[in-house]
Amino acid sequence: MRALPLLACLLAGCPVVDTGETPVSPPICRPDPNRFREPGGIWDTAIAVPDMSKSCVAMDGCHTQATGRSALRLVDKPRDQLTDSDWTRNYEVVARFLNCSTPSASPFVTKPESGTDPHLGGDLWECTGTCEPIRTIEEWISGP
């Protein structure tokens, strides 16, 4: 007798739950690549800064491609020796650490910012309120 309800369900078909479309991964943030590489742009403001103690690529073991210890590993050469493919690679690496919907929550901002995310390289940007280079980076991520 118990088989009858099961047989009826199989013959009539059981309801199927529609789970909707398969979610897609959010796109990688793609702010202006020209602003990333132009003189005085993001590369000079936030990565290869003149103050070697605050440069992401100045010391071995930080964020250089050859000796870096994190996923943010960048090709480090003098500006005039960086090729187009070097610039593209560096841009792609940095883009993985950007959050276009909330630029201030981007790891590219929060890691070196004082008192936010722990950063083995220390706090590079200590400021209260809006300050450089955070303001410049957040504006770049937000777009024009």
Image (cartoon, rainbow, N blue to C red):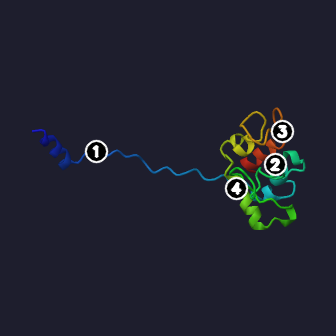
**Nearer the N terminus, badge 3 or badge 1?**
1
Residue situated in front as seen by the camera: 92 or 71: 71
In the drawing, what numbered circle is on residue 131? 3
Residue 77 seen in the figure: yes
Give the CA distance from mark 3 to mark 1.
57 Å
Q: Secondary structure at mark 4?
A: helix
Please report contact status of discs 3 and 1: CB closer than 8 Å, yes or no: no
**Image location of residue 3, percent across then percent down:** 13, 42
**Nearer the N terminus, badge 1 or badge 4?**
1
* 27 displayed left or right of 87: left
Residue type at mark 2: give it.
Ala
In the drawing, what numbered circle is on residue 93? 4
**Image location of residue 122, percent across then percent down:** 79, 39
Say which quarter of the image contains residue 67. bottom right
**Nearer the N terminus, badge 2 or badge 4?**
2
Binning the other alpha carbons within 10 Å of mark 4 as few (below 14), some (14 to 19) or many (20 upward) gives some
**Image location of residue 84, percent across then percent down:** 77, 67
Of circles 2 and 1, the one toward us is: 2
**Nearer the N terminus, badge 3 or badge 2?**
2
Residue drawn at (72%, 37%) of the image: 118
In the drawing, what numbered circle is on residue 15? 1
Q: Which residue is mark 2?
A: 46
Residue type at mark 1: give it.
Pro
Of circles 3 and 1, the one toward us is: 3
Q: Secondary structure at mark 3?
A: loop
Give the CA distance from mark 4 to mark 3.
24 Å
